[in-house]
Amino acid sequence: MAVAGLFSWSEVLPYILVQFAGAIVGQLIVVAAYKPHYDMTTNPQHILGTFSTISASKSKLNGFVNEFVGSFILFFGALGITKAPFFQNNLGTAHLALGFLVLTLVASVGGPTGPALNPARDLGPRIVHALLPLKHKGSSDWGYSWVPVLAPTLASICAILLYKGVFMK
């Protein structure tokens, strides 16, 4: 949004840091809840899949396309929802609509990668995975980690610029 002039550049770094902190804390809560299950699970991909995205097809291109499409729809739709006149005086309904948008995206494009739709959602928990001493955890798959960071970032910029160009002239 900062690229499109809709968010202050001075707030970008604090926003990113808070996003990462939330993703890391959330993942630590998941680990606390599922630690006995992690100990019993011997498939490293099953463990990694609860921390970060993984490509079911082992294809970075397919993962990139999947993450890009899902993130593009999320950001374009989120702007449409939050900028719509109906929601301006009804932010609770807008937040509910955003939740349903994310639910729909995860259900519809989530299969191939377990979508991040947000770089912090993948990278923060992936760092936790790398640092925690879990049985059978295997690799954190750093060779794939750029996909759920770059694809949502590029998709968000494209979606926001398109939305601004079409609806905010």
Image (spheres, rainbow, N blue to C red):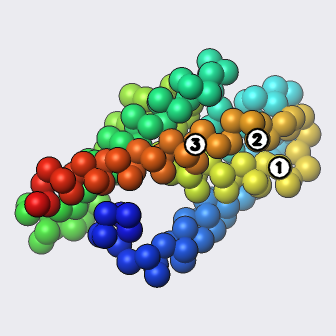
Contact? badges 3 and 1 (CB < 8 Å): no
Q: Position of residue 85 (x, y in %)?
A: 8, 63
Residue pointed to by mark 1: 130
**Among the two numbered marks 3 and 1 on one chain, the one whose residue lies closer to the N terminus:** 1
Q: With respect to residue 135, does 118 lie above or below?
A: below
151 with respect to 146 (left or right): left
Looking at the rendered structure, the kind of residue marked 2 is: Trp
State left or right for residue 157 relative to residue 138. left
**Vertical position of residue 77 compared to residue 147: above or below:** below
Q: Secondary structure at mark 1?
A: helix
**Residue drawn at point x = 67 percent, y = 61 percent:** 24
* x 62%, y 22%: residue: 59
Identify residue type, mark 1.
Ala
Q: Are marks 2 and 1 in contact (CB under 8 Å)?
A: yes
- Residue 1: quadrant of the picture: bottom left
| In contact (CB < 8 Å): disc 3 and disc 2 | no
Q: What kind of element bears circle 3? A: helix
Question: Residue under circle 2?
Answer: 142
SS at badge 2: loop
- List x then y, in percent, for residue 82: 22, 61
Q: Nearer the viewer, residue 161 or 83?
A: 161
Figure quadrant of residue 61: top right
Crowd tier of the residue under label 1, counting other residues whose Cα lies within 10 Å: few below 14, some 14–19, many 20 or above? some
User: What residue does disc 3 label?
Assistant: 148
Q: Residues within 10 Å of mark 2 (few under 14, many from 20)?
A: few
